[in-house]
Image: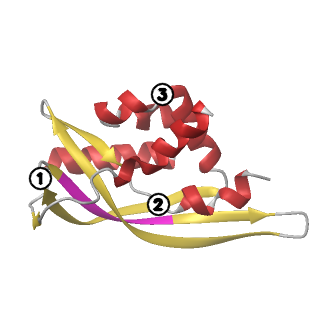
Amino acid sequence: MKSRSVYVLFLLFPLLNLFSCSKEKVQLEQKLIETAKEYYTYQKDKKWDSTYEMRSPKFKKIVDKSYYIEQMTKDANGWELVNFEIKDAEKEKDHIILTILFTYEISISNEQKSESRVQSFLEKTEWEKLNGNWYSYDAGYQYHLPLNDPIVRK
């Protein structure tokens, strides 16, 4: 039961700041661009231990590293991050919201057939700066978590 509760928290964490105040357009800091690219390159390479280390301290306080790696490995099954492109940035309180276009190759196979398709999603991700370093506060929903259920729960 505890595992299920932690999983629910893991999935709902991005919604914690859903009801926030106004947003304003911002000029991106080069360090944030580099950090976001590094984070999503790790994600593309499925280096979940590295993405975990780049998550905010608040996230790491409620989600155990081994649990995170296990769930990300399971949830990424059948999904290959092909590309990501930062499209926009806004400031919201003390965080930066990056709008990123993610492109995935999705592989679906069952006993009758095997197929793959390419799908793109425009997603908002949230970044927090602490002591001069940027952290992923909310890596985005990226749709594969709920949509992957039929693939990983066979």
Residues at marks 2 and 1 touching, judged by CB atoms closer than 8 Å: no
Residue 101 on the magenta segment: yes
> Which amino acid, by three-letter code, is at mark 1?
Lys
x then y, percent, for residue 154: 80, 53
Q: Which residues are magenta?
A: 96-103
Quadrant in the picture for residue 24? bottom left
Which label number is shown at residue 142? 2
Q: Which residue is mark 1?
A: 93
- Relative to 111, does residue 46 appear above or below in the rendering? above
Q: Are marks 2 and 3 in contact (CB under 8 Å)?
A: no
C-alpha span from label 2 to label 3: 21 Å
Q: Can you tell which quarter of the image residue 26 is in?
A: bottom left
Q: Residues within 10 Å of mark 1 (few under 14, many from 20)?
A: few
Residue 88 on image: x %, y %: 22, 67
Relative to 1, say whether 13 is above or below.
Answer: below
Residue at left 36%, top 54%? Answer: 15
Please report whichever mark, 1 or 3, sits nearer to the chain's N-terminal start: 3
Residue 56 as seen in the image, left or right of residue 31: right
Name the quadrant containing residue 7: top right
Mark-to-mark CA distance, 2 and 1: 23 Å
Residue depicted at x 52% and y 57%: 81
- The mark tally for this picture is 3
The prevailing secondary structure element of the residues shown in magenta is strand
User: Was residue 32 drawn as part of the magenta stretch in this picture?
Assistant: no
Q: Which residue is mark 3?
A: 64
